[in-house]
Image (cartoon, rainbow, N blue to C red):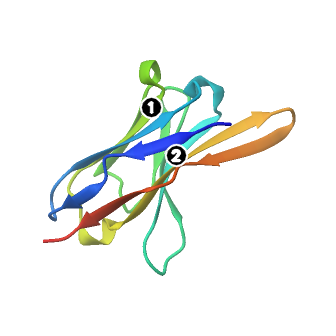
Amino acid sequence: QVQLVESGGGLVQPGGSLRLSCASSESIFSFNDMGWYRQAPGKQRELVASVTGSTSSVHSDSVKGRFTISRDDAKNTVILQMNALKPEDTAVYYCKANLFKGLKWYSYWGQGTQVTVSS
């Protein structure tokens, strides 16, 4: 069973930075894509950024230019570098991995890490 463990969340002031990590129990080469999602209280979970392969990534409009997703293949880790944080970035951030195997899609989620942006 694939396990994804997020870390790096916390409390930060507006304009500050945080670096989230998602460590996988499996080689991240196994996955078709990996991504970061977030869910604020009373809102639906939304995609923040995703990465496919080594260089292909997408970022939501709300974080473009401030957040960057990347991979550390040697450590089986996906990173979300978050800069210029705003109060509206406050949410639980989740890591997700998608795997296509045996003609089926499988999705795996981490337990989430809380990010709070407040002065």
Q: Amino acid at mark 1?
A: Thr
Which quarter shows the C terminus?
A: bottom left
Location of residue 40 by image quarter: bottom left
Neighbourhood count class around disc 2 (C-alpha, 10 Å): few under 14, some 14–19, many 20 upward: many
Q: Residue at x 35, y 57 (%)?
A: 63
- Classify 46 as above or below 100: below
Please tell me which residue lies in front, 92 or 15.
92
Considering only vertical position in the picture, is 34 above or below 115? above
The single residue placed furthest to the right in the displayed view is 103
Q: Amino acid at mark 2?
A: Gly
Q: Nearer the viewer, mark 1 or mark 2?
A: 1
Residue density around tag 1, few if under 14, some if 14–19, many if 20 or more, within 10 Å: many
Residue under circle 1? 77
User: Which one is in front, 112 or 106?
Assistant: 112
The label on residue 35 is 2
Q: Which picture quadrant has residue 10?
A: bottom left
For the N terminus, the quadrant is top right
Task: Please tell me which of labels 1 and 2 falls first in the chain.
Answer: 2
Q: Is residue 45 left or right of residue 59?
A: right
Work out whether residue 100 or residue 3 is closer to the camera in this orientation and state it. 3
Q: Position of residue 98 (x, y in %)?
A: 66, 41
Find the distance from the CA under tag 1 to the CA under tag 2.
11 Å
